[in-house]
Every structure is written in C-alpha cells, then in structure tokens.
Image (cartoon, grey):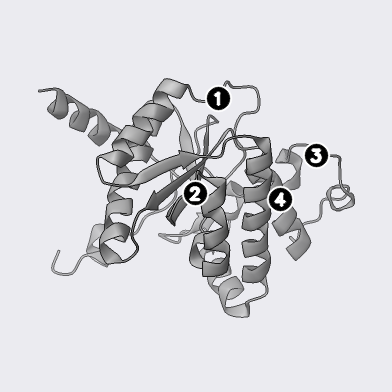
Amino acid sequence: VAKRVDETALLRAIPMRRTHHKSFARDAPPPTPALLDRLKQAADAHAIQLSFAADDAAKAAVADIVAEAERRDLADPGFVAERERWIRPEQSDRPDGVPRSYLLNLRELPDFGAPEWAQEIGAAETGTYQVERLRSLVRASPVLALLSSCQDGREPWLAAGEALKHIVLIARNAGIWASYLNGPIQRQALRSRLGPLFHNAAFPQVLLRMGYGFEPPPTARRALEDVLEGY
C-alpha cells in the first residue's frame, strides 16, 4: 500500500515537473538534510549514487568545470547552431523549443564583485557573458547534485535515467526545482574532474542544480501524433 501511495504521488508530480532555467530564490532555506537523504535513497533503489557538493569551495570548482564546458561548446559552430535552433522566438507558434525569455539575463545574477562584464546589459549575448552567467548561476545554486554509477555503459545509463526520473519527481513534490548542467558530462576530460568533487564518484552521469524558486510556465510540446508512429 505504501508503495502504491508513493507511486501515486510521483504520478501527480509529472505535469508539475519542468526544467528551471533561471536563478533560484536567494532568500529561501536550502533543502533539508532529510529530503536530501530521501533523494539519495531513491537513487540507491536504482543502484545509482547521488552525491552533493560539500561546500562553497566545491561549488566554485564545479562552476569552473561547467564554465569550461560552456566555453568549449561555444567554440563549436555546430553546437551553437543547434542550440540556437532550440531557442524559440517570443510569440512564436512553434510546437517545441525553449522561449528566449525563459533564459537568464544579467539582472538575475548574484553579485560576486560586479565584474566588468556585468556593468552593461546588451541585447545580444556574447560568449563571455554566457560563460560567466553560467559560472555565477552554478556557484549560487543551493544544491549541486551528481548522479553517478560504479560502471559505465548502456545499463548504467538506463539506471541513471530511472534514478533521475525518481529524484526530480520527489523533489518537485517537495517544492524543489531542478536544472541540468550537461556540458561536463558530455566531455570526458571534464567529466573525470567532477568525481573528486563529489565524494570520488566513479562515473558521473547527470549533474543537476536544485533549489526553490518561482514556477516557470510550461514549454511548448509537440502533439503526440507528431512523435509516436502509428498513433
């Protein structure tokens, strides 16, 4: 009966789960240790380890790695073009994509000494702005979480996906939002640097930032018949 109740609660959280692209609330308390333990237990159920950045120094180190991944991605014209295709213009009737207004602007950044690049806000994002925006966003996150596995390959990837689903739905029911930091995971040289910052995690699979914040509106989704054959 308890398992059925838990699954019902997770089911209710599905339509509430969204990726939170902007900064989290700065005046909210961090998630409780009891909740973080519950998230760890959910990951354990899928043979996946969930670890958290221990302190501000660890967060700063993770932020540097994420920023380096962003810098390398922005140097790849193919990556930049693909990302731009997924950003949906405002007032567009496209059935997919992330509206540009959902993304951060400089006014939302926490103040870490007001670097020179933060003094002016232009309409166009420069590479430096994007990298430093992301670095500050990661440093200010209440929780940085890493899902990792003891082995690597298709089965651990699948298990990590199942654990991720479980974790973000539990978090959503607790009022917590999550957002993905995929860059370092997709570059092996950077991926290997994450493990020591998360209790020596063997094979990092998913890097998340988590916290409380305003409720973002849902993004557009394609109709079922457009993505499912034979529907």
Residue at image mark 1: 30
- Residue 44 location, quadrant: top left
Q: Position of residue 208 (x, y in %)?
A: 49, 46
Residue at image mark 4: 133
Q: How many numbered tags mark residues here?
A: 4
Residue count near mark 3 (Cα–Cα under 10 Å), binned few <14, some 14–19, many ≥20: few
**Residue plotted at (27% across, 46% down):** 47
Proximity of marks 1 and 4: CB atoms separated by less than 8 Å: no
What's the mark number on residue 112?
A: 3
**Residue plotted at (68% across, 40% down):** 57
Instruction: Determine whether the residue tagged by mark 2 lies in a helix, strand or loop.
Output: loop
Dot 3 or dot 2: first in sequence order is 3
Instruction: Determine whether the residue tagged by mark 1 lies in a helix, strand or loop.
Output: loop
Q: Quadrant of the N terminus?
A: top left
Q: Say which amino acid is labelled 3.
A: Phe
Which sits in the foreground, 118 or 52?
52
Residue at image mark 2: 200
Q: Nearer the viewer, mark 3 or mark 2?
A: 2
CA gap, disc 3 and disc 2? 28 Å
What's the mark number on residue 9?
A: none
Q: Say which amino acid is labelled 2.
A: Asn
**Residue plotted at (36% across, 35% down):** 40
Proximity of marks 4 and 3: CB atoms separated by less than 8 Å: no
Q: Nearer the viewer, mark 2 or mark 4?
A: 2
Q: Quadrant of the C terminus?
A: bottom left
Instruction: Determine whether the residue tagged by mark 4 lies in a helix, strand or loop.
Output: helix
Q: Would you say 134 lies left or right of 144 here?
A: right
Instruction: Determine whether the residue tagged by mark 3 lies in a helix, strand or loop.
Output: loop
